[in-house]
Image: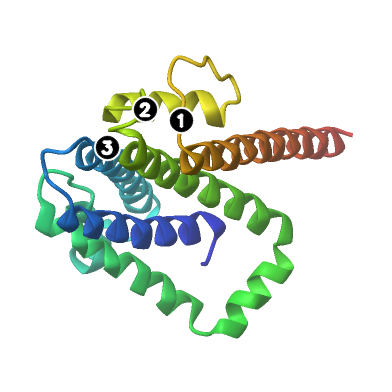
């Protein structure tokens, strides 16, 4: 059965392939390449958790593992670069469930709230990864964001709207990306508060 979580996993799988493809054009010893590796490890953890959930919920675990499950397991191993590209099969699996564009549209129409929350989560994750990667690329030689760890810290304090100010962009592109990231953080936390509020209200109504 199609769900928002499966759509998010499929989109993240496709995104991770694009992220890995970018490393072919980068110096493997560069800070930008290190940053991408950090994010890829985090995505691999997400994919591994998804694999474990699917295996646990599967009625026939042996059949699941030896049909498509082993692909999910292999693609969640970050140290084997070649195997990580097997994630594309996750997208194909979701497309087989969707079957048609009309069915996808119908799903979104009937699950507007859930689809909106799922979209916000996906956009937020990809925005954090992309903005921090681009900022490190443009700022590493001119600003004070010089390492992968600096970029991760800057993206974290920006998306949470804390803004300690110890690491900040000095270029126009970097500042524009800061505005985008801070706006994303405001939207993300607003959506989370809204989601929690709706769940609490739903529980109260069931209690009555």
Q: Tell me whether the residue at label 2 lies in contact with that at label 1, contact meaning CB atoms closer than 8 angstroms.
A: yes
Residue corresponding to mark 1: 170
- Between 161 and 87, the one lying in front of the other is 161
Q: Give residue 12's quadrant in the image.
A: bottom left
Tell me which label, 2 or 1, sits earlier in the chain.
2
Helix, strand or loop at disc 1?
loop
Horizontal arrangement in the rendering, residue 162 relative to residue 16 (left or right): right
Query: Which corner quadrant holds the C terminus?
Result: top right
Checking the image for residue 108, the label placed there is none
Q: In the image, residue 165 lies at what x, y percent? A: 51, 16
Residue 35's label in the rendered image is: 3
Which of pointers 3 and 1 indicates the residue nearer the eye? Answer: 1
Residue ID at (27%, 37%)? 35
Secondary structure beneath disc 3?
A: helix
Q: How packed is label 1: few (under 14 Cα within 10 Å), some, or many (20 or more)?
A: some
Q: Residues within 10 Å of mark 2 (few under 14, many from 20)?
A: some
Q: Is residue 59 visible?
A: no
Q: Is residue 163 visible?
A: yes
Q: Do callouts 2 and 3 mark residues in contact (Cβ within 8 Å)?
A: no
């Amino acid at each position: 059965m199609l769900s928002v979580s499966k759509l998010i996993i499929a989109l993240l799988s496709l995104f991770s392939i694009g992220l890995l493809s970018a490393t072919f054009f980068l110096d493997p010893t560069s800070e930008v390449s290190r940053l991408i590796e950090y994010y890829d490890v985090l995505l691999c953890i997400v994919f591994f958790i998804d694999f474990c959930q699917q295996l646990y919920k599967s009625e026939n675990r042996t059949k699941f593992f030896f049909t498509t499950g082993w692909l999910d397991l292999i693609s969640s191993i970050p140290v084997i670069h070649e195997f990580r590209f097997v994630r594309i099969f996750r997208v194909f699996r979701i497309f087989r469930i969707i079957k048609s564009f009309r069915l996808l549209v119908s799903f979104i129409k009937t699950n507007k709230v859930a689809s909106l929350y799922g979209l916000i989560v996906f956009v937020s994750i990809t925005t954090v990864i992309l903005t921090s990667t681009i900022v490190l690329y443009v700022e590493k030689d001119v600003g004070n964001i010089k390492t992968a760890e600096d970029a991760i810290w800057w993206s974290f304090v920006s998306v949470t709207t804390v803004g300690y100010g110890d690491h900040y962009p000095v270029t126009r592109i970097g500042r524009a990306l800061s505005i985008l990231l801070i706006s994303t953080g405001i939207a993300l936390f607003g959506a989370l508060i809204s989601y929690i509020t709706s769940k609490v209200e739903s529980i109260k109504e069931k209690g009555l």
